[in-house]
């Protein structure tokens, strides 16, 4: 499932998208993540199949997630950071965000991307919908030229998702992170704006 460009998403509203599950269609809503999502997100990150693919630790804290999400609502003036929640039946089932890579002025055109989807909704188009919305925001509204991410080298499902959305591998970091008792490699991937904005007229 690939949604159309949700041009109203960035004005405090939601994008409501039909999402074809394996048997029954579901309605997927994309909106800014908020502090009240913390409980559902902490539960999502308590699943080893979810946190094992990230740099998060087991036994996530609902309070810490509430603080993180409250810090982005409202965003700081002038900030182009965005964290989206994918919601089905009122329950967040996915989370994705674009985050600054640092304070250096000469890196302001770059953001890092992170994304997770609850195991119960993997393979149903949720990741595609989140990626499509974030990249639309990055390309058409937020003045972002380059997006970076890291992914565990053996996470083939995630790598395929990123490649479908224009990301390419740029290198491999050895023993990058401890995962289940082993130091594991990650791939560094990035995407450049496919058609940087022109000057109108």
Image (cartoon, rainbow, N blue to C red):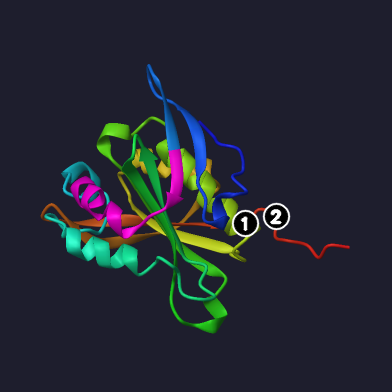
Depicted 42 relative to depicted 122: above or below: below
- The numbered dot on residue 20 is none
Mark 1 highlights which residue? Answer: 139
Picture coordinates of residue 190, whole percent (x, y)? 50, 57
Q: Is 34 one of the magenta-colored residues?
A: yes
Q: Quadrant of residue 142?
A: bottom right
Number of numbered callouts drawn: 2
Discs 2/1, front:
1
Picture coordinates of residue 113, whole percent (x, y)? 43, 58
Q: Residue at x 30, y 66 (%)?
A: 68
Q: Are marks 2 and 1 in contact (CB under 8 Å)?
A: yes
Q: Mark 2 or mark 1, which has the lower sequence index?
A: 1
Q: Residue at x 62, y 66 (%)?
A: 143
Q: Is 143 one of the magenta-colored residues?
A: no
Mark 2 highlights which residue? Answer: 195
Quarter of the image with the C terminus in it? bottom right
Q: Residue at x 51, y 60 (%)?
A: 147
Picture coordinates of residue 29, whole percent (x, y)? 44, 40
Q: Is residue 194 left or right of residue 108?
A: right
Q: Is residue 10 left or right of residue 50?
A: right
**Residue 192 in view, yes or no:** no
- The one nearer the camera, 9 or 127, is 9
Q: Quadrant of residue 22?
A: top left
Please provide the residue range marked out in magenta: 29-44
Q: Secondary structure at mark 2?
A: loop
- The one nearer the camera, 41 or 196, is 41
Label 1 crowd (10 A; few <14 / some 14-19 / many >=20)? some
Picture coordinates of residue 1, whole percent (x, y)? 50, 30
Q: Main secondary structure of the magenta part?
A: helix
């Amino acid at each position: 499932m690939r949604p159309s460009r949700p041009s109203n998403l960035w004005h405090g509203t939601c994008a409501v998208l039909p999402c074809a599950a394996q048997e029954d269609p579901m309605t997927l809503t994309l909106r800014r993540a908020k502090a009240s999502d913390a409980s559902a997100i902490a539960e999502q990150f308590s699943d080893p199949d979810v946190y094992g693919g990230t740099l998060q630790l087991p036994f996530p804290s609902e309070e810490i997630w509430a603080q993180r999400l409250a810090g982005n609502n409202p965003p700081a003036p002038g900030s182009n950071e965005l964290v989206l929640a994918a919601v089905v039946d009122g329950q967040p089932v996915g989370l994705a965000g674009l985050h600054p890579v640092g304070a250096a002025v000469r890196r302001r055109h770059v953001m890092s991307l992170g994304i997770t989807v609850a195991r119960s909704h993997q393979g149903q188009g949720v990741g595609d919908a989140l990626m499509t919305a974030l990249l639309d925001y990055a390309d058409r509204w937020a003045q972002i030229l380059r997006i970076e991410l890291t992914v565990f080298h053996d996470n083939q499902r995630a790598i395929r998702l990123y490649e479908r959305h224009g990301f390419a591998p740029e290198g491999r970091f050895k023993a990058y992170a401890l995962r289940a008792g082993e130091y594991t490699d990650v791939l560094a991937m990035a995407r450049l704006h496919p058609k940087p904005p022109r000057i109108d007229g």
